[in-house]
Image (cartoon, grey):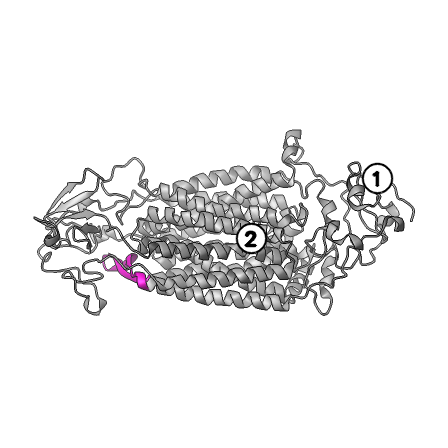
Amino acid sequence: MAMPQNSTRENGFCFTQPLDFSCPSPRPGEAGRAFGAPLCAPTPAEEETPLQEGIKYVSAEGEELACGWGGFTPGCLQLCNTSKGVLFFLCVASFLQGMTVNGFINTVITSIERRFDLRSYQSGLIASSYDIAACACLTFVSYFGGNGHKPRWLGWGVLVMGLGSLLFALPHFTTGQYEARSAAQVGVCGGNQSLPCSQAASSLSSYRFVFMLGQFLHGVGATPLYTLGVTYLDENVKTNYSPVYIAVFYTAAILGPAAGYLVGGMFLNIYTEIGREIDIAPENTLWVGAWWIGFLGAGAASLLISIPILGYPQRLPGSQRYIVMRVSEAHQLKDGSHKKASDPDFGKTVKDLPRSVLLLLKNPTFIFLCLAGATEATLIAGMSTFGPKFLESQFSLSASEAATFFGYLVVPAGGGGTFLGGFLVNKFKLRCSGIIKLCLLCTVSSLLAIFIFFIHCPNMPMAGVTQMYDGSALPGGHLNLTAACNAQCGCLQETYSPVCGSDDIMYYSPCHAGCKRVSENLRNGRKVYHECSCVDRALLPGSGQAEAGKCTSSCAKKPLLLCFMFVVILFTFLSSIPALTATLRCVSDRQRSFALGIQWIVVRTLGGIPGPIAFGSMIDKSCLLWQDQCGEQGSCYVYQNSAMSRYTLVAGLVYKVLGTTFFIVACLLYKPPPPESSPGSSDVSENGTSDLQEHKPSLPAQGDI
């Protein structure tokens, strides 16, 4: 074959088959040294020649590859017009998304319940609104965005996400000031007062619809990030580097929630009405922290980061040469219909949508990977939403302490597991079947560790709630807050302000402890109540005393429980990037964005949406003490730890066993391409992830060209 002339700007490679692509000028000696082949480009006649089941290289002539906005493309911006530049901005966006949706919201869920009189299933519905929005948008975004200008879809998505954060914080500014019943207002025996029911009963719970709308915008905005963002990275880097890039991207998404737990926990130590003096401490169950500050900051940051993302070109300069480095690992269908997706024109119109869906539904490996992801997502969504509440109840912590504690677990376990998963795939050069086996190993490991929920920390004893005032068991498990020691005090159940007696027993309020006098502890600033007739005086000479706030838990099982929770989180997240990589590899190249979209629909519909709602309902079942708002049930004050652990164990076992089963079936049904698949075969234009250097023998020798 005669040597065609070099005509354009990128690296080109000669094959014995006629190829349909433009071959720009190479850097001196770059491709020739790497592959032992001369540099060439097809002649115009060859560009029109149809493929003989080979590679199609789409012409890039006239395509704008500069970074900028419209005609404004300054040279300084081109320094960021690289795969690392894209990775940086997408990492910031995923960090903000994770910090907001999976960090701040989960951290402040208890405070929002308290501030707006919500029950756990209602707050679970708020959390699920994110996934409902994602499901509504995923098909449209992944199908048309996958064949469109991905950075523009990504940029507008991040902007919408920022608007959702600002809307989520809006109820703080549109409601009246939060009126907490302070220690002074609660009073002591004989002086307890309550707001009239007409004032106490409020319609604040209606604000859940504003929170749901904010979460809906979060879901709409984040939809492109984890479908188009992943495929944009995968298309613009060498295939053997792709798992590492995606792992870094997802690690940022995991570190976001961790930062959200830590920063959100700090904000909860600030009273929600900033500048207003209040005499209750953060440990008090009536305390509501400044839950809204994080959403304002994250919203503003999202609006700013959307600007550079909108400036990126449809593909990065130099990325097209990576197409020839792909070797297919797509699942082989018996009827050969998977080859339809190799046409570059496939998927560009609505009429191809049903065929695209059918091709994915006929891929059993893809289907069972989706189902396995859904089971994992159910646990992740449920535990990330109510994990802080679990720690708060088990270890008798304040909301801010529980959020900070949970953040310390998620940072090394979730972030480290996510990055380690991508590193292992790259380190051992795992093919698709090996990746699925790695996912199976991780799921089995976390399944074994989840048996730790057989143990739990006992509830701190609470007079009238977990035991009688004399220490005996409650008859029939019914509340009985009145005893002889406080019968003359006129205590009201509407006012909940727990105190810890000197006998290490909690009481519903200073009044219910029979306390008659109050002072302030100069050491920690907490209120101290004296002459408490219900507190056992044998432990303290003189009269019984009580201090405002919960009693401190001294659970001996705490280190063991935290250690195994760390293991469960680590192995759950360790399988996330390998499972995502397996999904990208088991489908055809042109279906990757759409496949991720369909997978996210399955994951969210079966996992992300029902997860928080199911866990919220489960946690409500373990409630011992409900808020009483003039006869109407409000949020839960006290949970039964043993029941909470038991329900968590059952849910964990069910979903982990299902996940293990789905990974086993996916591994057994996976059918890889025949070993002789090569860059000249019919499957090369489909998704593959091995570097070309592993398949040098399949390239034509220099003398054959």
Q: Are marks 1 and 2 in contact (CB under 8 Å)?
A: no
Cα separation between marks 1 and 2: 43 Å
Q: Which residues are magenta?
A: 620-642
Q: Is residue 420 left or right of residue 476?
A: right
Q: Residues within 10 Å of mark 2 (few under 14, many from 20)?
A: many
Residue type at mark 2 is Gly
Looking at the picture, which amino acid does disc 1 mark? Ser
The residue singled out by tag 2 in the image is: 421
Q: Earlier in the sequence, mark 1 or mark 2?
A: 1
Side of 307 where 333 appears, left or right: right
Query: Could you tell me which secondary element the residue under label 2 belongs to?
Result: helix
Residue 62 coordinates in the image, percent (x, y): 76, 40
* Residue appearing at x 62%, y 60% in the figure: 434
Residue 258 versus residue 552: which sits nearer the camera?
552
Q: Give x and y (percent) for residue 660.
A: 52, 66
Residue 168 visible (yes or no): no
User: Disc 1 on helix, strand or loop?
Assistant: loop
Q: Nearer the viewer, mark 1 or mark 2?
A: 2
Q: Position of residue 570 (x, y in %)?
A: 48, 54
Q: Which mark is residue 7?
A: 1
